[in-house]
Amino acid sequence: MATIFIDGQAGTTGIEIATRLRARSDLKLLSINEQQRKDPSTREALFKQADLAILCLPDEAAVSATELAADHCRLLDASTAHRTHADWVYGLPERNADSRAAIANAQHVSNPGCYPQGFILSVLPLIEAGLLHASTPLRCYAVSGYSGGGNKMIESFQSFTATEADTFNTQTYGLTQSHKHLPEMQHYSGCAHAPIFLPTVANYYKGMLVSVALFADELNGATPADVHRVLDTRYADEPFVHVAPVNATDSLHHGYLNPTACNGTNELQLLIFGDTQRTIINARYDNLGKGASGAAVQNLNIMLGLNEELGL
């Protein structure tokens, strides 16, 4: 029975992960009381007891925690701090054929960001198949529930008056193109340049859509059917990534693509729409599921040599 410590278990992602792990009989979850959760000596003692620790902390705190943990245990970091770090393995099992083995053997794994997963899994296979050139400038549009912003954003949205909830219903951000996910999106997608990235937070709790729109001449003349063929072949054996048929109307609700349809699951759906001249790839998933806590549990299972689907 592996022993797990969540450093930062009071945060949104930490709570989600802890809830999933407490329901399992094959793991022992260490706990820390509220008064000691920032005490270095108490945390270090828990790192020493753990086989694996999950860091659910702000970036600077995650770096400090890594130093505190030293070599006492293996680490899975849910922050942005180490996602492009050369000494950390990127924890996206579906990225390529070598990802799972790298995660399984790593001392340090960086859990992927929520938005980047959909972008990377949509774009990378097209570049590797030769449909999309790595130097093609890309645009990525995304919408997420407010839980993606953590406790501060959750409190802000949930405290809105009726007027505020209407006024601030949907808000686009990252307009200066300095979003913290951009380096990760470029680094692991195979793109030569970071995309133009326009994320939006909307007034619902969780669920996300990440969309990439491409013209046929950006795809060497490929159609939505060609894109579907590449993605469907690539993810045919993946337990959590599912590619819908082209222009799948049964994926829509009254003609609309709803970002919440995968909530409560670890499923990531790739939905391809368009015509002979335009292709739109949409990744739909739960930003707190496959986008965060579900991804962490999936990585934990792989790191511990367990069935990847346990608890998911």
Image (cartoon, rainbow, N blue to C red):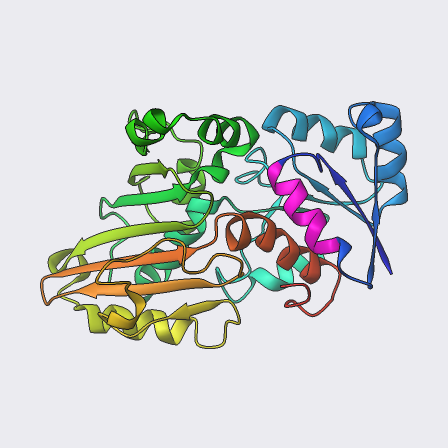
Which of 47/34 is in front? 34
Closer to the camera, 68 or 200? 200
Q: Is 70 one of the magenta-colored residues?
A: no
Q: Which residues are magenta?
A: 12-21
Residue at 34% over, 50% down:
210
Task: Please indicate, yes or no, whether residue 255 appears anywhere in the rendered image.
Answer: yes
Instruction: Give the vertical position of 157 relative to 75 (above or below).
Output: above
Q: Along the horizontal axis of the image, is 155 left or right of 219? A: right
Quarter where residue 8 is shown? top right
- Res. 125 image quadrant: bottom left
**Residue nearest the observer in this picture, 253 or 199:** 253
Give percent across and percent down for residue 272. 26, 65
Q: What residue sits 68% from the left and 63% below the top?
A: 311
- Residue 141 at what x, y percent from top left? 28, 44
Secondary structure that dominates the magenta span: helix
- Quadrant assignment for the C terminus: bottom right
Residue 220 position (above or below residue 59): below
Question: Residue 305 vs residue 90: left or right?
Answer: right
The x and y percentages for residue 15 are 67, 42
* Position in image of residue 72 (x %, y %): 85, 40
